[in-house]
Image (tube, grey):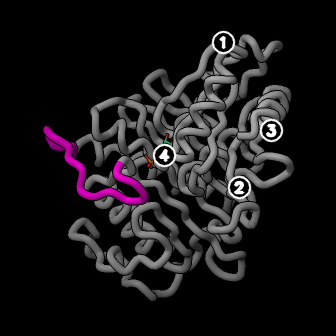
Amino acid sequence: TAQEVAGLRGLAARLAREAGERLVAGRPEEVSVADTKSTATDVVTAADRASERWLRDELRRLRPGDAVLGEEYGDVPEEAAAPSASVPEEAAAPGDPVPAGAPGAGDGPRLTWVLDPIDGTVNYLYGLPAWGVSVACVVGDPQVPGAWTPVAGAVSAPVWGELFHAGTGQGAVVEGPRGGPRELAVSEPSDPAQALVATGFGYAAERRAVQGRVAAELLPRVRDLRRMGSAAIDLCCVAAGRADAYYESGTKVWDHAAGLLVVTEAGGRVTGLDGSPPGAPMVVAGGPAMTRWLHDELVRLGA
Ligand code: IPD
């Protein structure tokens, strides 16, 4: 129901905002790389892990019946299973019954919370501002492109002091230093040559080689390209009209689940290539006409 969606959206927004505030407050003088993942450039910091553990603790306490999929601990949260010291005493233990009256509790479809505890980890590492926390609540299987639908989503950009959030059928807003909530609406440039297009690059060298070639072909045909360093923030910028479109291949569901809903609720389109669902393997987003143009260019370029 609309009330349930609003409740889930409120929780997503609170979690993204508070996780972001904790990351800013707890940031050490020197941030260091704790580990690498898929490649040597795919880094993880202690803050990524602590942020995801905090999000999981909150969800375990408030929504024990829901599933969780996170960037750092996946869907089998063994490492994250032990509640951290930050869990308040009244926290529900894993396996406690779903609190009566909790939105989504009971007979509804199973919900999964899809978490990116820091999207834009490299920016966070270097002290650049474009990083955020992405929290999405989805129905279906988020590990299979096209098999899930977002219900609510929130992306915080704590250094910018902004919080973007959306609920299915309920629009998308930004709250921030200039007040809010302010309704978001995508832009639609009349000519792609005047479009500011955001993109991103994956961590694998072979993928980057293709992405670099595609970017080089596209650059002379648009106003400019931006590589902000956080897919979630790229999508929110499209929703806010701060970029006219965004595309990237190889993003993971936690990078785009919340931002995708923010874009569509802001009147935009998000697609994959040639009828494939977004994320398999491409995400293309923007106003309807710009998305169509960019999609066709990407197909032509063999992206
Ligand atoms: C990355 C960022 C980046 C995008 C990469 C993502 P992470 O996420 O969103 O902008 O280009 O594809 O993996 O690793 O910082 O969570």
Inspect the image, locate mark 3, and give the three-letter code of the amino acid beneath it. Val
Asked if 154 appears above or below 136 in the picture, the reply is above
Q: Check disc 3 and report the residue beneath it.
A: 299
Q: CA distance from mark 1 to mark 2?
A: 27 Å
Inspect the image, locate mark 2, and give the three-letter code of the amino acid beneath it. Ala
Q: Quadrant of residue 87?
A: bottom left
Element at label 3: helix
Element at label 1: loop
N-terminal of the two: label 1 or label 2? 1
| Secondary structure mainly formed by the magenta segment | loop
N-terminal of the two: label 3 or label 2? 2
Query: Relative to 150, is 127 on the left or the right?
Result: left
Asked if 9 appears above or below 158 in the picture, the reply is below
- Which of the numbered marks, if any, corresponds to residue 205? 4
N-terminal of the two: label 3 or label 4? 4
Camera-nearest residue between 98 and 189: 189
Which numbered disc, 3 or 1, marks the residue closer to the eye? Answer: 3
Inspect the image, locate mark 1, and give the three-letter code of the amino acid beneath it. Arg
Q: CA distance from mark 1 to mark 4?
A: 27 Å
Element at label 4: helix
* Range of magenta residues: 26-40
Q: Check disc 2 and report the residue beneath it.
A: 280
Q: Check disc 1 and report the residue beneath it.
A: 223
- Residue drawn at x 43%, y 74% is 60
